[in-house]
Image: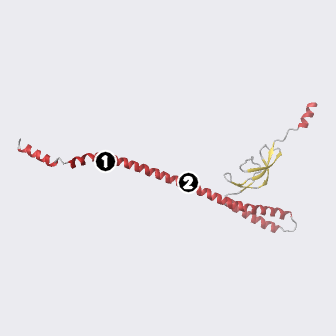
Amino acid sequence: MSNEAHAREQGDAALDDGSPEDDADATPAGDAAAPAEDTVAQLEDRLRRALADLDNLRKRYEREVARERLNTRMQVSLQWLPVVDDLERAIDHLQSSEDCGPDVVEGVRVIRDRALSVLAQLGFPRFDATGEGFDPARHEAVSVIDSDEPPGTVVATTRTGYGTGEVVLRPAGVVVARAPAPDVRGAGDQDAG
């Protein structure tokens, strides 16, 4: 063996002394990368799920807050409705009375209008249903009459309703049209003739 070949063998032996530590470091490094990637993927998945849960919780909380605000507005408005009804009756009574002047009627009307404004600001404006089609969500039928109007049309309002299309505080009391009943007497007389 030449000196050069012998030196090469000694150099290789110096680099690889055959210790088990060198072999242990080389092999697990490649295998350790795979579990680390799996761990990172699992943690990222858990993070995404936690963020989605947090977003769902935020949305549910917003819905619950909106529902509670609506319930509170409805409770306050329901307490306010008898006051508005009393002001309506007071105006009707004062207009038919000869004992009070027009200034008193106008003063009560201004107070009533302010009360209606408060209800509208709370989200429950006044609505008159006359001429509309009967809607059980917005109307309460108090009577049905024969009419020339199409059947199911509101022909009169007996009690004013409050609310919007989405939320009705109090349905309007209405009189609903029905088709006139056929004249049974007249039909029998025509058949005889």
Q: Who is closer to the viewer here, 80 or 153? A: 80
At label 2, counting other C-alpha atoms closer than 10 Å, the crowd grade (few under 14, some 14-19, many 20 or more) is: few
Give the left or right position of residue 128, taking residue 23 as reference: right
Q: Out of 76 and 9, give the one closest to the viewer.
A: 9
Q: Earlier in the sequence, mark 2 or mark 1?
A: 1
Question: Label 2 to label 1, Cα distance in Å?
Answer: 42 Å
Instruction: Give the secondary structure at mark 2.
Output: helix
Per the image, the residue denoted by label 2 is 60
In the rendered structure, which amino acid carries the disc numbered 1? Ala
Location of mark 1 (residue) = 32
Which image quarter is the C terminus in? top right
**Where is residue 101 shown, x and y percent of the image?**
84, 68
User: Which residue does the image show at 72% across and 63% down from the upper left?
Assistant: 115
* Quadrant for the N terminus in the image: top left
Closest to the observer: 131 or 67? Answer: 67
Q: Residue furthest left?
A: 2
Asked whether the residues under the numbered discs 2 and 1 touch, taking CB atoms below 8 Å apart as contact, a structural biologist would say no
- Residue at position x 69%, y 62% from top? 118
